[in-house]
Image (cartoon, rainbow, N blue to C red):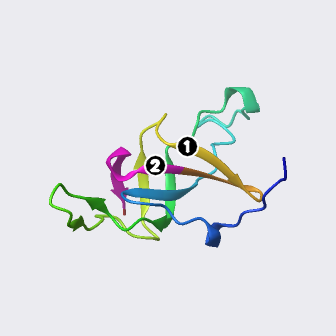
Amino acid sequence: MAAISLSVSTVKPLGDRVLIKVSDAEEKTAGGILLPDTAKEKPQIGEIVQVGSGKRNDDGSVQAMEVKAGDKVLYSKYAGTEIKLGADDYVLLREQDILATLA
């Protein structure tokens, strides 16, 4: 099987899906204790890199996305599909799995 090299610009989400660049996990606790890799929690915050065209309704019309590229968001902990592009981690998930936008 041949290996495929992908970049962020070649990945375009379909429908109501978004591609999110995952923020780095916390390196230490509030008290200053350094965390080993096994104790770090999975991050739930990231920045939207790409958005799909929107959800298709029953009548065939497309419902516009509420989020856009560049928004910082909080998403469900175990939602979506994790993707590694280059050295960065991304998650591809549905718009409904986004819990909130962050200011």
Q: Main secondary structure of the magenta part?
A: strand
Name the residue rendered at 63%, 42% in the picture.
26
Give whichever of 27, 98 is nearer the camera.
98
Callout 1, which amino acid?
Thr
Position of residue 15 measured from the top left corner of the image (x, y, whole percent) = 38, 59
The C terminus sits in image quarter: bottom left
Residue range (magenta)? 92-102
Secondary structure under the numbered disc 2 in the rendered image:
strand
**Residue closest to the eye, 67 or 25:** 67
Q: Earlier in the sequence, mark 1 or mark 2?
A: 1
Which residue type carries mark 2? Leu
Q: Quadrant of residue 30?
A: top right
Q: Is residue 74 magenta?
A: no
The x and y percentages for residue 73 are 42, 55
What is the number of the mark on residue 93? Answer: 2
Residue 97 counted in the magenta span:
yes
Residue at the disc numbered 1: 81
- Residue sitting farthest toward the right: 2
Graded by Cα atoms within 10 Å as few (under 14), some (14 to 19) or many (20 or more), the crowding at tag 2 reads many
Count of all numbered marks drawn on residues in the image: 2
Q: Residue at x 26, y 59 (%)?
A: 56
Q: Is residue 9 left or right of residue 65?
A: right
Q: Secondary structure at mark 1?
A: strand
Left or right: 19, with 64 as reference point: right
Place of residue 98 in the rendered image (x, y in percent of width and height, measured from the top left): 37, 49
Q: Position of residue 90 (x, y in %)?
A: 61, 53
Are circles 1 and 2 on residues that touch, CB within 8 Å?
yes
